[in-house]
Image (spheres, rainbow, N blue to C red):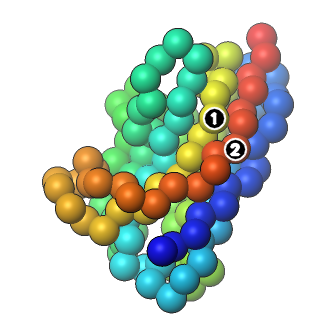
Amino acid sequence: QVQLVESGGGSVQTGGSLTLSCAASGPTFSNYAMAWFRRVPGKERELVAAIRRAGNNIHYTDSLKDRFTISRDNAKNMVYLQMNSLKPEDTGVYYCGAGDGIGPFPFFEYGHWGQGTQVTVSS
């Protein structure tokens, strides 16, 4: 199984920025589509962004596309989420997930998860 470890969370003021990183172990990272999810208070877990294994197809939740950017570096086994213009409602735990392509992109079955990293945005 691929192992995923998120980092880069923290506390920022409204309007600030954070870059989240997800480090993957294993020899087959480049075979997985990758995604960022989040769980915010009072809401269901939601897909934030997804990127196919070659990095040539990207999906964002429409309401976040103008503020968040997903990218990956297969040579380094890393995926990133750049978050700008953060708002208090962005507060929550952010997870990266790995999927093997079952189902239509971006709604794959993501069978591997990290432990999450906390993002807190104060007003």
Residue identified by numbered label 1: 93
Specify the amino acid type for callout 2: Thr
How far from the left and from the top, in percent, is residue 46? 42, 32
Residue at the front extreme, as displayed: 1
Q: Quadrant of the C terminus?
A: top right
Q: Quadrant of residue 39?
A: top right
Name the residue that disc number 2 marks.
117
The reply to whether residue 45 is visible in this rendering is: yes
Position of 99 relative to 29 (above/below): above
Q: Are marks 1 and 2 in contact (CB under 8 Å)?
A: yes
For the residue pair 76 and 17, the one nearer the viewer reads as 76
Kind of residue indicated by mark 1: Val
Determine which quarter of the picture holds residue 21: bottom right
Q: Residue at the spot x=82%, y=31% of the render? A: 11
In the displayed structure, 120 sits above or below 37; it is above
Q: In x, y percent, where is residue 61?
A: 37, 35
